[in-house]
């Protein structure tokens, strides 16, 4: 056989292999072992499991879990999963009807279990699900995920513990980094106006005041009255808040109306509910650093 012919055969084999792998990944049969509801939870769970099991997010990148409309494929994906990791604290409203229809059994890990919840007495004691925006709460999440995985797969418990310890070190470094960055802003300028009430835990941890929100709810899935909009304009003027911060998936039209009346900036590209494909928020830690950098830029 000539060298040329050998190379041709190898090329054909490689192309066949690539096609087969491509088909396998398109058919959707390779469901992940561990399914998480959000891309943020998928990233932190990967840090706990390492290469031991596959991890995937039910919601695609860029999707807002508050207003997510499930598809029939979601039921199939949950049915095939062995472990399901959810945020809990009333975050995943789409999940309840889905769970009523799934087959099989799986380990359910609620990442926010046991953490202190902020709640809103004026809003029927609704709880604030955005615990992850404080890295100290994220430490609680990964400990819960580790405990759930240890029960699911006791043979790998030692590895899950080692991975979790390493990742918690990174989360502690993140918290220290955020504190250092925030120190650049004088306390009287640490003012946040946001789309919905997402920054409560972050504000408590890093000494910010939440001056107001366009939507007075822990969910983006609501709309304000004209009266609420007028009250927010007054609050912004009273505090001289410099900016309104929105998630990239938020509709900016109401924030722009308020900005037109108050002269504040609108930052439209924070990432609070989902990671991004590649930069700037490919991982939870990158997402937090990106958001903090954006906030500091706007408040300085
Ligand atoms: Zn939210």
Image (cartoon, rainbow, N blue to C red):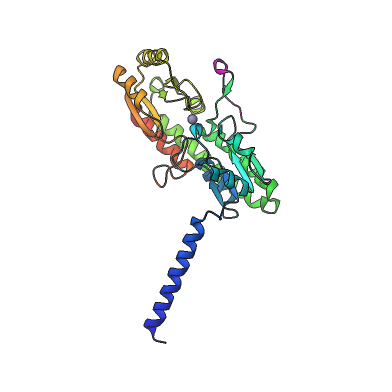
Residue at x 64% of width, y 37% of height? 100
| Position above or below: 256 against 15 | above
Q: Could you say where residue 193 lies in the image, as x and y percent from the top left? A: 40, 23
Residue at x 58% of width, y 36% of height? 95
Chain part drawn in magenta: 116-124
Q: Is residue 271 visible?
A: yes
Q: Nearer the viewer, residue 12 or 4?
A: 12
Q: How many marks?
A: 0
Q: Could you say where residue 212 lies in the image, as x and y percent from the top left? A: 43, 19
**Residue 209 among those drawn in magenta:** no
Q: Nearer the viewer, residue 294 or 175?
A: 294
Q: Quadrant of residue 128?
A: top right
Q: Quadrant of the C terminus?
A: top left
| Position above or below: 103 against 186 | below
Q: Could you say where residue 107 lies in the image, as x and y percent from the top left? A: 67, 44
Q: Nearer the viewer, residue 157 or 127?
A: 127
**Residue 122 among those drawn in magenta:** yes
| Position above or below: 221 against 106 | above
Q: Nearer the viewer, residue 34 or 174?
A: 34
Q: Is residue 263 visible?
A: no
Q: Quadrant of the N terminus?
A: bottom left
Query: Is 293 left or right of 29, judged from the image as shown?
Result: left
């Amino acid at each position: 056989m000539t060298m040329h012919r050998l190379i041709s055969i190898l090329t054909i084999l490689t192309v066949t292999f690539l096609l087969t792998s491509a088909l396998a990944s398109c058919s959707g049969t390779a469901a992940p072992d561990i399914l998480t509801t959000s891309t943020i939870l998928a990233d932190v769970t990967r840090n706990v499991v390492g290469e031991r099991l596959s991890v995937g997010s039910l919601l695609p990148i860029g999707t807002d879990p508050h207003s997510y409309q499930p598809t029939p494929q979601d039921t199939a994906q949950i049915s095939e999963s062995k472990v399901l990791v959810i945020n809990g604290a009333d975050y995943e409203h789409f999940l309840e009807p889905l769970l009523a229809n799934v087959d099989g059994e799986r380990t359910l890990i609620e990442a926010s279990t046991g953490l202190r919840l902020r709640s809103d007495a004026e809003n029927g004691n609704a709880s604030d699900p955005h615990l992850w925006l404080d890295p100290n709460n994220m430490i609680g999440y990964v400990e819960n995920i580790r405990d759930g995985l240890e029960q699911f797969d006791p043979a790998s418990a030692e590895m899950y513990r080692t991975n979790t310890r390493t990742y918690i070190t990174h989360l502690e470094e993140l918290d220290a980094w955020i504190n250092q960055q925030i120190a650049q802003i004088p306390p009287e300028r640490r003012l946040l106006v946001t789309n919905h009430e997402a920054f409560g835990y972050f504000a408590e941890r890093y000494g910010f005041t939440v001056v107001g929100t366009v939507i007075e709810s822990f969910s983006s899935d609501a709309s304000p009255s004209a009266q609420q909009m007028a009250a927010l304009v007054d609050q912004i003027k009273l505090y001289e808040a410099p900016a309104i911060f929105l998630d990239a998936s938020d509709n900016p039209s109401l924030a722009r109306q308020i900005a037109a009346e108050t002269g504040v900036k609108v930052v439209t590209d924070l990432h609070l509910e989902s990671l991004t494909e590649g930069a700037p928020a490919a991982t939870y830690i990158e997402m937090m650093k990106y958001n903090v950098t954006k906030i500091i830029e706007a408040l300085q």
